[in-house]
Image (cartoon, helix red, strand yellow):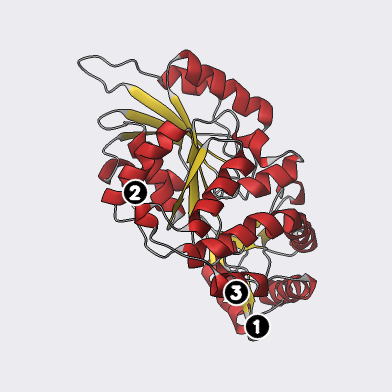
Amino acid sequence: MSYQGWSDFRSDTVTRPTPAMRRAMAEAEVGDDVFGDDPTINRLQELAAGKLGKEAALFVPSGTMGNSICLKAHGSREKEIILEEKSHIFNFEAGNVAHLVQAIPRPLPSDRGQIAVEEIRRHICQGDDHAAATAGICLENTHNFHGGATLSQAYIQEVARLAKAHHLYLHLDGARIFNAATYLKVAASDVARPFDSLMFCLSKGLAAPVGSLVVGSREFIREAHRVRKYLGGGMRQAGILAAAGIIALEEMTGRLEEDHRRARRLAAAVSEFPGIRIDPATVQTNIVILTVDHPRLNEDEIVKRLEEERVLALTFGSGRIRLVTHNDIDDGDVDRAVSALLAAVSG
């Protein structure tokens, strides 16, 4: 489903709203959400809370704001937060853990996003005159930097038990939680259940034009609402945006396996190309990360050659290239990317 002749694999954030979303946005009933009387936003929040098995939800402009709201609402100021060293919160959210939350990040290494439980345990600090106490643990599922890898349910449960034993909150950056649930073949509420708070995006694989949701207990969401206000996240007749989010939750979660299938096909097709390394078995969801090991070309040069063939991808650091499948990528786009990549590394 290339757009204006381009096959755009840069991210699942590039998706365009579906015709059903555009109709819903045009017809949305709206009110002033700062006063709590936008009926479409209220409906979206109720729907999101139900889908994730939580008491309440809050519509926010972006995933970055959603994560920051959660960590701030948990009362993390001047305390440590344990997170994975390649996590989105630590690397790609403008230093908000320190800047906005005013907490100290404790980044730990992992195996494809899964920090060893004993490593977490070893770094939990109860606090004394010399060290900041640990406030919480953050996980990411699926994990962006590690190629859309999922966390196992058993692992999440183990971390949740550890957090509870030490009276720590457990937060999930669940930007792509529905991709994780699809891969694990469970409900999103099953993935979300052990977490005290969670953020997920409407504007990635679910194809809405903008918006994310924070979910948790009613008490937690009341505090999150207050934090959203002083971060400037209160919107007025934003039911126009929420209407697309409702369509995203009702109609788009069930098609994510198509994206996963195309990502696996792409990875398998390019795995034998000269100068490209990828193990197709590691591709679980909709993100394909290629490592460039080419005698003449680096990742920037390969991405430039792809662009000349009207295929868009992203360099992703350390000699890597990222391609993401989504609602606006079809089998023809995958075929074009495969052909373009072969020509790029063989020419």
Q: Tag 1, which secondary structure?
A: loop
The Cα atoms of the two marked residues, 1 and 3, are separated by 30 Å
Q: Which residue is mark 1?
A: 309
Q: Which residue is mark 2?
A: 228
Q: Tag 2, which secondary structure?
A: helix
Labels 1 and 2 touching (C-beta < 8 A): no
Whether residue 59 is visible here, answered yes or no, is yes
Mark 1 neighbour density, 10 Å: few (under 14) some (14–19) many (20 or more): some
Label 3 sits on what residue type?
Arg
- The x and y percentages for residue 315 are 53, 64
User: In the drawing, does residue 7 fall left or right of residue 98?
Assistant: right
Q: Eyeballing the image, is 214 above or below 315? A: above
Q: Which label was assigned to residue 18?
A: none
Mark 2 neighbour density, 10 Å: few (under 14) some (14–19) many (20 or more): many
Q: Tag 3, which secondary structure?
A: helix
Query: Earlier along the polypeptide chain: callout 1 or callout 3?
Result: 3
Query: Earlier along the polypeptide chain: callout 2 or callout 3?
Result: 3
Label 2 sits on what residue type?
Arg
Q: Eyeballing the image, is 251 above or below 107? A: below
- The x and y percentages for residue 146 are 59, 46
At horizontal 50% and vertical 52% (from top left) the residue drawn is 42
Q: Which label was assigned to residue 22?
A: 3
